[in-house]
Amino acid sequence: MLAYVCYHVSLLWMMFCGFQPDTAVHHADTAHVAPAIRLYTPYTKISVHPGQSITYNIDVTNNSKVTQRVDLWLSGLSTAWNYSLKSGSWDIQQIAVLPGQKESVTLQLTVPLRINKGTYRFYLHAGHSTALPLTVIVAERGIYKTAFTTDQPNLEGAANSTFTFNTTLQNATADTQLYALNAEVPPGWDIAFKANGYKQVASILVSPNSTQNLTIEVHPPDQVPAGKYRIPVMASSGSTGAALDLEVVITGNYGMNLSTPSGLLSTDVTAGSEKTLKLTVTNTGSADLKKINFTSSTPTNWDVSFDPKTIDELPAGKTTEVKAIIKADKHAIAGDYLVTIRANTTETSAKADFRVTVKTPMIWGWIGIFIILIALASIYYLFRKYGRR
């Protein structure tokens, strides 16, 4: 009886002092008891874009003293989200972990293409007692459409230039799309679509949520007037499509003619001497020509020089004169020779072929006449001396 009374007195004293022995011990024990299965990944909150894939590497640790076999599944996401759980190359739904050991699983998650911007929370479950909270922040609204873009939509140049646009075609849908490629160009213009930098195509196949680089080459007619030209291009499939506006700015066209004041492209020269030709250079384009220089192709040991050597600027529609000094080889025999003269600028060029007739020097003519006279005199002398015999 005395022991019973002492025991209850001690309990009353502990309760008076704020202690609850049994309850306190019980709560202390349960507060430090680790769950049998623990899930861990370092990246629990990720910001992504629509259509992007996420890979989580997750450790499954067994804190108990017996082998744990647990089911794995996700909750909190709609069916629009695609995911898979893998260990190695296997898709898994359940995993067994030895006591005190851990296994690794991979969670692969694909964000839907058609999705609103916002924060999405979900859980990876291991059995019914353990859940790993995960958060995905979708940074923008999913477009679920086609996008056709370029970094440089407008280019400037001469009419005889090739205008090259580098573009990107994006298939932001969940299906493979076959896009037909078309453009509206002015009459006389040419346009070419090239995939992979060189292969000309009329259509292109683009995988879901993928992009394709396209090069668009625009060729205007040589005589197109200066101005701005809008060129709409389209990529369309049966269910989606996109358009892109390109702009070509024509600064003018370049043309040049090389001739003589009379239009005659022939002359003559004596072997070893020089002949000066007057050339006319005409700017037949609508843009000014700058830094016109001259070159020539001649027979061996011939030479052609120019005065002036360079024309600094020739306005559109204007004509100027240049002298070409042709020097024939001193050993050239009589006959016709071809001399080609070219006028060159960065944008265009022109050439003229001249037929040059080589004549022998007059001294040889007089020598020939003198030889003939000597021959005639010799015959006359012989006739006088021996003719009567």
Image (cartoon, helix red, strand yellow):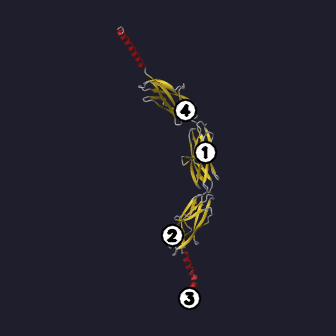
Reading the chain from its start, which is encountered first: label 2 or label 4? 2
User: 356 or 134: which is nearer to us?
Assistant: 356
**Residue at point 58%, 65% (across, down):** 134
* Cα–Cα span, label 2 and label 1: 58 Å
Residue 21 % position (x, y): 56, 81
Compared to residue 200, the image places residue 134 above or below, namely below
Place of residue 177 in the rendered image (x, y in percent of width and height, measured from the top left): 61, 53
In this rendering, the answer to whether 19 lies above or below 261 is below
Q: Nearer the viewer, mark 3 or mark 2?
A: 2
Callouts 3 and 4 close, C-beta under 8 Å:
no
Percent x, y of residue 50: 60, 58
Rendered location of residue 276, percent (x, y): 48, 25
Residue indicated by mark 3: 6
Residue kind at label 4, given as amino acid type: Met
Residue of label 4: 256
- Return the residue at label 1: 246
How many numbered dots are placed on residues in this image? 4
Q: Nearer the viewer, mark 1 or mark 3?
A: 1
Crowd rating for badge 4 (residues with CA inside 10 Å; few <14, some 14–19, many 20+): many
* Res. 102 mark: 2
Give the mark nearer the N terminus: 1 vs 3: 3
Residue type indicated by callout 3: Cys
Mark 1 and mark 4 in contact? Answer it, CB < 8 Å: no
The nearer-to-camera label among 3 and 4 is 4
Mark found first going from the N terminus, 1 or 4: 1
Helix, strand or loop under label 3:
helix
